[in-house]
Image (spheres, rainbow, N blue to C red):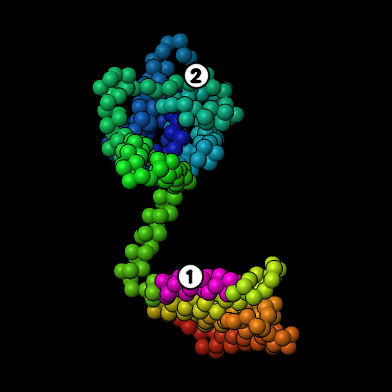
C-alpha cells in the first residue's frame, strides 16, 4: 500500500479551520484543503494538501501501480520542533492503525519546505519513505511575486517591527554622530548609546519579551479600570523601597565615617539597619492592599492577614540583629545588647506564631465565603 502523507508541522490546518487531525481519505483531505484555502488563501499548506490529492489521483490512474493508495494529512503543534515531531508521530501511528491492510506500507511525503522536512526521521521510524515531494509555487520565482512577498512581509506588524526598527536605528547612526559633533559630543558616545539601544532591542525580540510586556500592560490597564487598591499600595511600596535603599546607603556612609576599616558583617548590618524599617513598611503596605482587593472581590481568606504580621516579625528580627553588630556611638544606629537581641528574636517569633494560630482559629470558627467554597 502507498500512503500519500501531507505534513503540516505547525498545525496551520487545525488552528485555522478547527479540523480534527489526522485526516484520512481523498474527500476528507480535499474538504480540509478547501476549508484552509477559504480561511487563509496564502497559506502554503493549502498547496501541500492539494498536491497530496494530485499525487493520490495520479497514482490511482497509473496502470503500473498495482497496489492500494490512500492519502492522509497529519499535523504537529506550534510549540516547537520536538513537540511538533512527537505530535506528528502520534498521528502517523493513528493513521497506520486505521489502515485495514496486511500489505507493507510505503509513504510518499508531501511538504512545503525544509522546516517541515525535519519530520522525515519520525516518519521513517514508522514507515518506509518511497519519495519526498516539496511543493514550490511557480509564481514565487517571478520578480513580481518577490515584490508581492516583500510587500506582504512588511505589511505584517510583527515582521515590520523586527526588520525596519533595527534598520532605522542603523540608518540614524550617521546623522546622530553629525549632530553630536556640532555640540562637541564625542562620536564614540553616540555610537555607544545607539549600540546599546540596538542591543537591548535585539535581546528584547530574541527573548520574546514582547508578549510579557503586552500582558503586563493589559494587567495594568485592567487594574486601572477596576479600581484596585493594589495599584496605589504598590506605588507607595515602591517609593518606600527606594527611600529605604537610600537610608541604608546613608547609614553605611555614616558607619564608615566613624568606624575604621569596617568588616563585611558591619557593612551588611548598616545597610539592613538603615533600610529594614522602610522595607517592612513597604511589605505591610503592599500586603494590606492585596488583602483589601481580595476582600472586595469576595476571595478573602483569614490566612491572608498573616502576611503583614510576618513582614513585621521579620523586620523586628533583622532590625535587632543588625543593631547588635553596630557600635552605639554612630548617629542613627539603635544598638542592641545580647539581651535585647534575645527579646527581639522572641518577640518576632511569637508575633508570627500567634498570628498564625489566631487566624487559623478564626478560619475554623468564622469561615469566609471563599473558605467555605474551597472547603
> In the image, is residue 287 above or below residue 193?
below
Q: Residue at image x 52%, y 31%?
A: 119
Residue 193 is a magenta residue: no
Tell me the magenta residue range: 233-253
Q: Earlier in the sequence, mark 1 or mark 2?
A: 2
Between residues 167 and 143, which one lies in front from this camera angle?
167
The residue pinned by badge 2 equals 131
Circle number at residue 359: none
The residue shown at (47%, 26%) is: 114
SS for dot 2 = strand
Q: Residue furthest right?
A: 338
- Which residue lies at the image location 39% right of the left edge and 79% below the top edge? 296
Residue 2 in picture, x, y percent from top left: 49, 22
Q: Which residue is mark 1?
A: 242
Left or right of 341: which side holds 227? left
Q: Nearer the viewer, residue 142 or 258?
A: 258
Amino acid at each position: 500500500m502507498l500512503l500519500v502523507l501531507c505534513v503540516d508541522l505547525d498545525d496551520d490546518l487545525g488552528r485555522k479551520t478547527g479540523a480534527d487531525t489526522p485526516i484520512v481519505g481523498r474527500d476528507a483531505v480535499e474538504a480540509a484543503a478547501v476549508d484552509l484555502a477559504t480561511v487563509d488563501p496564502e497559506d502554503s499548506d493549502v498547496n501541500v494538501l492539494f498536491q497530496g490529492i494530485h499525487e493520490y489521483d495520479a497514482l490511482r490512474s497509473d496502470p503500473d501501480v498495482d497496489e492500494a493508495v490512500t492519502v492522509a494529512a497529519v499535523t504537529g503543534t506550534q510549540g516547537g520542533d520536538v513537540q511538533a515531531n512527537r505530535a506528528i508521530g502520534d498521528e502517523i501511528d493513528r493513521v497506520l492503525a486505521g489502515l485495514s491492510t496486511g500489505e507493507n506500507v510505503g509513504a510518499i511525503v508531501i511538504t512545503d519546505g525544509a522546516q517541515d522536512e525535519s519530520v522525515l526521521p519520525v516518519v521513517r521510524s514508522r514507515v518506509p519513505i518511497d519519495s519526498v515531494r516539496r511543493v514550490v509555487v511557480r509564481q514565487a520565482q517571478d520578480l513580481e511575486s518577490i515584490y508581492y512577498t516583500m510587500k506582504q512581509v512588511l505589511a505584517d506588524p510583527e515582521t515590520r517591527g523586527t526588520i525596519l526598527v533595527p534598520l532605522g536605528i542603523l540608518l540614524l547612526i550617521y546623522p546622530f554622530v553629525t549632530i553630536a559633533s556640532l555640540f562637541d559630543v564625542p562620536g564614540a558616545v553616540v555610537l555607544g548609546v545607539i549600540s546599546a539601544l540596538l542591543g537591548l532591542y535585539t535581546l528584547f525580540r530574541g527573548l520574546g519579551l514582547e508578549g510579557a510586556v503586552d500582558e503586563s500592560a493589559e494587567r495594568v490597564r485592567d487594574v486601572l479600570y477596576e479600581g484596585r487598591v493594589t495599584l496605589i499600595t504598590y506605588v507607595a511600596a515602591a517609593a518606600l523601597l527606594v527611600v529605604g535603599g537610600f537610608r541604608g546607603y546613608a547609614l553605611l556612609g555614616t558607619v564608615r565615617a566613624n568606624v575604621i576599616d569596617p568588616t563585611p558583617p558591619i557593612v551588611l548590618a548598616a545597610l539592613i539597619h538603615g533600610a529594614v524599617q522602610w522595607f517592612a513598611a513597604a511589605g505591610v503596605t503592599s500586603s494590606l492592599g492585596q488583602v483589601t482587593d481580595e476582600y472586595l472581590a469576595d476571595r478573602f481568606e483569614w490566612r491572608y492577614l498573616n502576611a503583614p504580621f510576618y513582614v513585621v516579625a521579620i523586620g523586628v528580627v533583622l532590625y535587632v540583629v543588625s543593631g547588635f553588630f553596630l557600635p552605639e556611638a554612630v548617629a542613627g544606629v539603635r544598638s542592641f545588647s545580647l539581651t535585647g537581641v534575645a527579646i527581639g528574636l522572641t518577640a518576632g517569633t511569637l508575633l508570627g506564631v500567634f498570628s498564625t494560630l489566631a487566624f487559623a482559629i478564626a478560619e475554623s470558627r468564622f469561615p469566609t465565603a471563599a473558605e467555605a467554597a474551597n472547603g
